[in-house]
Image (cartoon, rainbow, N blue to C red):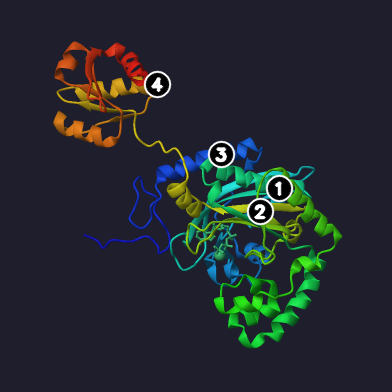
Amino acid sequence: MGQKIQAVKGMNDLLPVAQKDFKLTAALWQAFEDVVASWTRSYGYRQIRTPIVEQTGLFVRSIGEETDVIGKEMYTFPDSNDKLSLSLRPEGTASCLRAVVEHNLLYNNPQKLWYMGPMFRRERPQKGRYRQFHQVGVEALGFEGPDVDAELISMSAELWNRLGIRQHLTLEINSLGNKQERAAHRTALVAYLQKHEAILDDDSKRRMHTNPLRVLDTKNPALQPMLKDVPRLIDFLGIESLNHYQTLKEMLDGLNIAYVENPRLVRGLDYYNQTVFEWTTDKLGAQATVCGGGRYNGLIEELGGKSAPSIGFALGIERLLLLVQEFGHLAVNDVPDIYVLHHGVGTSLTAMQQAALLRSAGLNLYVHCGDQTLKAQLRKADNSGAAFALIIGEQEQVNRTITLKNLRTHEQQTVEAESVLQLIQDWKNT
Ligand code: ATP
Ligand code: MG
């Protein structure tokens, strides 16, 4: 026997059944994907699917060199043929915009798009934090806002409604202003950080010069007191940015979406400006952020397209589903309606023929395969969760009849093969 090979650390299998340390099932996931498809459709957003691998430069340019994602989390490797550096995508916005620019989708047309799929970051794996994880992302490209900002945020809130977890999530919002406003704030921030240089950790010391806003994002508890009095970006915003932010807040009020203003919310990626927001929960321990997003007006131009103001968000599917599984509702349907048993010469073929007929009437059937006693098969039928068992034994085979058994009430009835669909429907309705 060869040695067993295990999955890569931090990368999960999605199985039909829950695992000890990873409780999400493929059926739950599938049910979630169905909800996402109808939820995005109900807002008129259309799907985009891009490759999982891109040129490394795409992510470096869009996400920013001084971020954790680019600095230490990306899976990067040379393409053997042409010395190109490639990376597994760590997030979806860069790829989405690359495709939009490449295919000129914004020509005369703003775009409302969504995507879903695996992302890769080499982080320390723990509950709610994995090396392959999955996101749903929504992007509104070519819209100035703030109306679309409000639409996107309320759209995310509506998804929480549909999943029954709205009351477990808190919306935090902030405005990062425009480039000039951030530059003025940056000067003040660097001066403030320099005053406290003695207590900064190495990461923060380095970032103080390369990207000081990111220091505000530090999780180092020792730095939290110092950060309390840090110059606030909001105090540097001009009239236009303030108006944008104010209108957004009024629209959220009008849409009945409660929010908390968090002046220190800056988000982990470099490309944001003006509106930023996060949905957090106190139910997942340290992995509190389920969804995050914001406006990135300069990014499309940065990637070689014609400038177009845009905004988007991404949610982490694993974190969201951990929450849904415990506190929400999501109808999972992975049990057959009917378990088909058979015993005796020629009955397995009859069973399959009968199952085919019932499938074309819209039923889901699990047909037993292999020889086993009826008793053993009935046990399996019980364990399958199916409501009914359909039994074809030698007697039924000869008489062209079928026995239907209600696995809940144990009621049993033998009828002509042609009448079995009617009987199933009668039983379903009682
Ligand atoms: P965090 O602060 O938790 O590291 P982030 O700011 O890096 O999150 P984003 O890049 O904004 O996350 O990604 C959006 C969402 O994707 C997050 O809110 C989270 O739900 C999810 N996510 C990010 N990284 C991971 C990961 N390693 N494992 C699972 N989910 C993740
Ligand atoms: Mg992160």
Other residues around mark 1 within 10 Å, as few (<14) / some (14–19) / many (≥20): some
Q: Earlier in the sequence, mark 1 or mark 3?
A: 3
Say if mark 3 contacts mark 4, CB within 8 Å. Answer: no
Quote the CA–CA distance across marks 1 and 3.
Answer: 24 Å
Quote the CA–CA distance across marks 3 and 4.
Answer: 25 Å
Say if mark 4 contacts mark 2, CB within 8 Å. Answer: no
**Residue 212, relative to residue 376: is it above or below?**
below
- Residue 24 drawn at (x, y percent): 41, 50
Q: Earlier in the sequence, mark 3 or mark 4?
A: 3
Say if mark 1 contacts mark 3, CB within 8 Å. Answer: no
**Residue 157, relative to residue 125: is it above or below?**
above
Q: Earlier in the sequence, mark 1 or mark 4?
A: 1
Per the image, label 1 sits on a secondary structure element best described as helix
Quote the CA–CA distance across marks 4 and 2.
Answer: 49 Å
- Between label 3 and label 4, give the one nearer the viewer: 3
- Between label 4 and label 2, give the one nearer the viewer: 2
Other residues around mark 2 within 10 Å, as few (<14) / some (14–19) / many (≥20): some
Q: Earlier in the sequence, mark 4 or mark 2?
A: 2
The answer to whether residue 6 is visible is yes
Q: Say which residue label 2 marks.
A: 259
Say if mark 1 contacts mark 2, CB within 8 Å. Answer: yes
Say if mark 1 contacts mark 4, CB within 8 Å. Answer: no
Q: Amino acid at mark 3?
A: Ala
**Residue 164, relative to residue 311: is it above or below?**
above
Q: Amino acid at mark 1?
A: Leu
Going 55% across and 72% down the picture, which residue do you hit? 72
Q: Say which residue label 1 marks.
A: 252
